[in-house]
Structures are given as C-alpha cells and as structure tokens.
Image (spheres, rainbow, N blue to C red):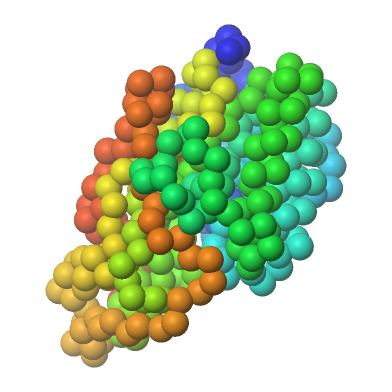
C-alpha cells in the first residue's frame, strides 16, 4: 500500500491508446478539475489524431509522438501505461512489435517511474486468463494461455508486463497499480478496429452482414469507456496494488450481441441501407469461449462498479459511428 498521490499541480502521463479510444475526451475534463498537467505519448500505430485534435492547444495538455519501446526522459507524478495494440487485427499484423511494446515499453515506463518516483498504473487485460477454466474469473485465477499461439504476443506480453511491474514493486519499492481490463467499447473507436462491438456496428450501419466467428455461443462482457476511465482513476488514486478486474459483469453471447445491435440499428438506417443480417464464419484460433469478470475486489476496495448498460452504451456509440459514416 502507498499514500494517496496529491492531484493539484501534478503531471499525468498516459502512454498510447488515448488516441485510439479517445480516452482524453474523458480524462482531460477531470484533469482540469484536478489542476493536473496531461502529457500524452502516442505513436499512433492504432490511434487517430482526430480523436485528440480538439485538445491541442489546451493549457494543461501536451501530446508527444513517441514509441514507448524507446526510452524517454520526462518529469511526471503518475504514469498510466496503456500502450499496446489490443485488437487481434492489429496484434496479429505485427506480433513482434506487440510483445516489444508489452516488454520493452513496460520496462521503459517502470524505469521512468523509478527515476522520478511516480506512481505507475499498468493496463493489463482479461486476456491474461486465456481460455479460462474458471468462470467468472477472479484475480486469483492464474489463467489458461497457449504460449505459442497467434494471440500469445498479446496474452503473454501482458503477463510479462504484470511480472515486471510486481518485480519493480518488490525490488525497488515502486508504487504500482495493475488493472485487468475486460472488453471495452465506446465512441471514437476505429470503424475498422477489429473488435466485436465496433465490427458489428460498422457492418450493420454499412449494410453488410455482421460476421460471427464460430457458432456465436462464446461469451464476452462489455464495459462502456467512461466506466473504464472511472475504474482506472479509482485504482490509481486508491491504496491497493492489484491486480484488480475492471469490467462489466454483464455477459452476452456473440449471437445475443448481434441481435441487440440489429434491434438498435435497424430503426436508424436510411432506406438505402439494407436491414442488418448475420453471417457465420470459421472461428479463429485460441478464441476464449467464456469471459466474465468477478468485480468483487473493485466494488469493495475501490467502491467502483460500471454504470452504463450495454444497450445504452451502444446508443451513444451508434451516434458517433453514424456521424463518421455520413449517415
């Protein structure tokens, strides 16, 4: 445990994924209230500059185009280490780069935290549980991961990142926080992000069939982006090292998700766009069959739990996607 960091006049460093998810949209208003400077590092491998263009020129926001696999010297008080491609499309496209980000990037950020005595938050993932044999997944579960599969660059990379974080904690006394983030969705995601919610929405709005890989019975739990940000801030500012699951325990099969999106999207389509349909294709390798967080620790230790229901969050996301698709 460690004492709570003071917010006034502190400097916060988020590493990539801010632009890919538009997290700064949610972080910066809070940062202004805290009188906090935000320095965003991003190499824009998966992120979009458009997501943060409205923040450029703000007095307490700075963006540096930088890849965390390379060292950088900055003076900060808190580090939100969010860097790493999280979509299968992206991490399978460049698996070596993905694991470098989790290993070398984490080493560089931990080194910075050690040098400037900053508090360090690692955004780990539910993928450390692999294809789980425990359901729902608690933080004590060690996981069931294929170390040589196509997903291993991400799964094992994040497991190594957790190992490094706890080794720095034990050996150097670094203040660490480890969040295991479950599936997250929201506005500003790339239209071709590759994750299931954005895939289904983009396909439905474009009038192409929603693609389900496998039989559609595999399950996921989806949390809205604002809930995630609130959970990360609660973890960073709290007294508990973690790991702590940050996710929405509502569980849906892929088929249930597709049917919900059909219901929500269909009434909003222009006459020229056909009604949403579903097509089934062969499943990808090592696809987890079940995923649901046990958030008991988050609720009891952080006083946090998600607030946005899936149907409500989809409505907000659809408006953003329609605007960008010109519908």
Choose between 67 and 235: the one closer to the eye: 235
Q: Residue at x 54, y 31 (%)?
A: 243
Q: Position of residue 29 (x, y in %)?
A: 45, 34
Determine whether 214 is above or below 254 in the image.
below
Tell me which corner region of the image, top left, top right, bottom left or bottom right, holds residue 111. Answer: top right
Choose between 318 and 294: the one closer to the eye: 294
The quarter in which the N terminus is drawn is: top right
| In the displayed structure image, the side of residue 93 where residue 313 appears, left or right | left
Choose between 82 and 23: the one closer to the eye: 82
Q: Position of residue 292 (x, y in %)?
A: 36, 47
Residue 261, can we see it?
Answer: no
| In the displayed structure image, the side of residue 80 where residue 214 appears, left or right | left
Q: Residue at x 63, y 68 (%)?
A: 150
Determine whether 26 is above or below 299 in the image.
below
Choose between 279 and 13: the one closer to the eye: 279
Determine whether 81 is above or below 43 in the image.
above
């Amino acid at each position: 445990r460690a004492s709570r960091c003071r917010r006034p006049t502190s400097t916060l460093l988020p590493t990539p994924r801010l632009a890919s998810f538009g997290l700064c949209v949610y972080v910066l208003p809070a940062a202004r209230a805290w009188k906090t400077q935000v320095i965003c590092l991003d190499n824009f491998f998966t992120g979009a500059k458009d997501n943060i263009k409205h923040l450029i020129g703000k007095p307490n926001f700075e963006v540096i185009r930088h890849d965390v696999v390379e060292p950088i010297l900055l003076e900060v008080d808190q580090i939100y280490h969010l860097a790493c491609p999280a979509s299968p499309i992206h991490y399978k496209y460049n698996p070596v780069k993905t694991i470098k980000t989790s290993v070398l990037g984490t080493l560089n950020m931990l080194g910075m935290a050690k040098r400037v005595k900053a508090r360090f938050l690692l955004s780990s993932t539910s993928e450390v549980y692999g294809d789980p044999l425990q359901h729902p997944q608690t933080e004590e579960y060690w996981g069931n991961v294929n170390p040589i599969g196509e997903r291993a660059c991400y799964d094992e990379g994040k497991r190594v990142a957790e190992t490094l974080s706890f080794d720095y904690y034990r050996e150097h006394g670094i203040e660490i926080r480890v969040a295991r983030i479950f599936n997250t969705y929201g506005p500003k995601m790339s239209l071709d992000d590759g994750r299931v919610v954005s895939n289904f929405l983009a396909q439905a709005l474009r009038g192409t069939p929603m693609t389900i890989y496998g039989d559609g019975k595999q399950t996921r739990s989806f949390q809205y982006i604002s809930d995630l940000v609130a959970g990360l801030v609660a973890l960073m500012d709290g007294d508990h090292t973690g790991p702590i699951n940050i996710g929405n325990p509502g569980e849906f099969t892929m088929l249930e998700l597709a049917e919900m999106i059909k219901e929500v999207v269909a009434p909003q389509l222009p006459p020229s766009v056909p009604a949403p349909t579903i097509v089934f294709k062969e499943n990808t390798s090592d696809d987890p069959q079940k995923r649901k967080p046990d958030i008991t620790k988050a609720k009891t230790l952080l006083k946090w739990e998600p607030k946005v229901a899936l149907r409500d969050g989809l409505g907000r996301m659809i408006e953003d996607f329609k605007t960008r698709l010109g519908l």
